[in-house]
Amino acid sequence: MKKTFCAKMIPYLFIAPTVILLAVFSYYAIGNAVFTSFTDKSSNFIGIRNYVDAFHDEMFLTSFKNQVVITVAAVFFSVFFPLLASELLFFIKHKKISGFIRTAFVIPMLVPSIVVILIWKYLYNPNFGFNTILQKIGANGWIHNWLNDEKTALFAIVLIGFPFVSGMYFLIFHSGLNMIGEELYEAAIVDGATNWNVVKDIHLPNVKPYTKIVVTLSLINSLSGFGLVAATTNGGPGFATMIPALQMYKVAFGDGNFGYASALGVVLFLVIILLTMVSRKLLKDGE
């Protein structure tokens, strides 16, 4: 009896450290943030005033609009371009060439994202990069201070990372295509299917589970991260490129108002959960 009980407890003992660490460093932090969101700068309880202020805060509303633009672009780019690259690689039958291309897509994963961001910031520098190229080809009318103009700053940030073939997302789609059974291709050959028919009728339906993963990851990364904006424009000019996560950071560590920052964080957390659930529901209904 004791041996049976001990055997049943072994799996729980293995996962116990992970559960304890999650409880201490994740769930406690979330609970504490929710509690703090009902307090002011002096830690006095003020009810839902922070939440009311958030939805009347011009900077917060603008930051949310900016976040919508960045997130929609990020999700589209994260799905379309890695999937396109995976499809193109699939139809390259030469093993050495396909292996080289696959490696070329994966190697950039070794480069820290902040390095990539700083390279793009250099390219947007008004005295170097793109402006130098435009000047040399005689397109002086296009020369611009891309990151310091309210009309172009957000657009410039959205384009950082072109051609948007993330190594991780590429590998997810590449693995998905390789998991498709050979019998489907054999049937397609018998039916005289073209490459487009293979993509439309075999690939796209079968990579939907992998698309869910990519959409979920890109949503979370886009909504919760602020390194891209912080390293390029820091939310400026004005707050033309401000996003909720960066505003939350500035309010907390710049103004010392952890109550209001926590309220912004809770709103952002709920939006991430809601959008993740909606996206998964839409993808599920499309199956």
Image: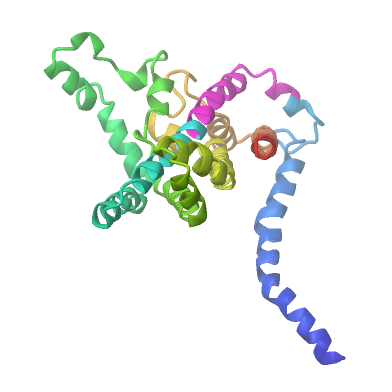
Instruction: Work out whether residue 2 or residue 237 is closer to the camera in this orientation and state it.
Output: 2
**Residue 126 in magenta stretch:** no
Q: Quadrant of residue 127?
A: top left
> In this orientation, does residue 139 appear?
yes
Q: Residue furthest top?
A: 141
- Asked whether 73 falls inside the magenta stretch, the response is yes
Question: Which residue is depicted at the point 53% across and 28% down?
Answer: 72
Measuring from the top left, give residue 278's x and y in whole percent. 69, 34
Quarter occupied by residue 165: top left
Q: How is the image coloured?
A: rainbow
Judging depth in this view, the residue of 148 and 214 nearest the camera is 214
**Quadrant in which the N terminus appears:** bottom right
Q: Could you tell me residue 79's position as x and y percent?
A: 48, 37
Predominant SS along the magenta part: helix
Q: Is residue 90 left or right of residue 27?
A: left
Q: So how many labels did they put on this image?
A: 0
Residue 132 is situated, as x and y percent measured from the top left of the image, at 17, 22
Q: Image height check: is 68 above or below 114?
A: above
Confirm whether residue 181 shows in the render.
Answer: no
Judge by depth and name the residue closer to the eye, 232 or 12: 12
Q: Is residue 219 left or right of residue 94?
A: right
Q: Quadrant of the C terminus?
A: top right
At a point 49% along the width and 31% down the height, the residue shown is: 76
Q: Which residues are magenta?
A: 52-74
Q: Please say if 95 is above or below 254.
A: below
Q: Residue at x 32, y 44 (%)?
A: 115
Residue 85 position, x and y percent, is 37, 41
Apparent side of residue 161 relative to residue 205 in the rendered image (left or right): left
